[in-house]
Amino acid sequence: MAKSTELREQVAPSPPQAPAGGNPPGVWAKIKLVISRSFFWSYERGSWQYDVIVAAILAFIFLTPRAWLRHETSLGMVDLRHIQGVVEVAHDKAQHTYVMDARLLQSRSPEALEAAAQDILQERLGKRYRVLSVEAVRDRAGVILSYKVVVEQ
């Protein structure tokens, strides 16, 4: 009997206290679990968590302003030499190669593309060029997108 009285007189250790921040140690683990399960889409279909994720995705799709998602191309026909419809793509000492918008060239003279290219270059660049060749650039369907014009001064 002496042993049992000894145990009753001892003080039992107190349970661990919460950290000073006030959050129990398992809160961050639960938050990480919710974030990882949401990111990896591991909730079962039909659960309320699954429905919340789907609602959030649909809200993003339908409520996001179009201006936020509009992608402007960084390099277009008007960016290289800043003359709309005419882009210099290569040159050496004697020759210059331009890409001209098909609509621009065909609106001038669809029958005489060399003359139209020469007129456009003279208007836009202020120099007289002699056109050596005009070659159509087509897409996969065969539609003419632009013309490659090789000129010399």
Image (cartoon, helix red, strand yellow):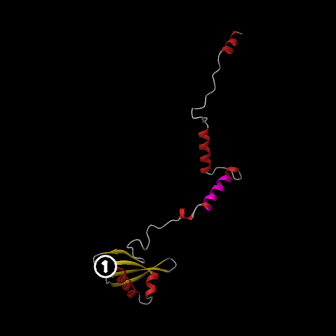
Q: Quadrant of residue 106?
A: bottom left
Q: Amino acid at mark 1?
A: Gln
The quarter of the image holding the C terminus is bottom left
**What residue is drawn where x is 69% and y is 15%?**
8
The quarter of the image holding the N terminus is top right
Classify mark 1: helix, strand or loop.
strand
**What residue is drawn where x is 34% and y is 79%?**
125
Residue at the left extreme? 93
**Where does residue 73 sit, x and y in percent of width and height?**
47, 68
Which residue has dot 1 on it?
A: 95
> Is 85 left, or right, of 29 in this rendering?
left
Q: Nearer the viewer, residue 123 or 148?
A: 123
**Where does residue 53 sit, x and y in percent of width and height?**
64, 53
Q: Is residue 44 magenta?
A: no
Q: Nearer the viewer, residue 19 or 4?
A: 19
> Is 137 left, or right, of 153 in this rendering?
right
**What residue is drawn where x is 38% and y is 88%?**
115
Judge the density around disc 1: few (<14), some (14-19), many (≥20) Cα neighbours within 10 Å: some
**What residue is drawn where x is 62% and y is 57%?**
57
Q: Is residue 53 above or below residue 125?
A: above
Q: Is residue 85 above or below residue 9?
A: below
**Where does residue 122 sit, x and y in percent of width and height?**
35, 83
Callout count? 1
> Is 132 left, or right, of 1 in this rendering?
left
Q: Quadrant of residue 132?
A: bottom left
**Where does residue 128 sit, x and y in percent of width and height?**
31, 84
Residue at the bottom extreme? 111
The kind of secondary structure the magenta stretch mainly shows is helix
The part of the chain drawn in magenta is: 51-62
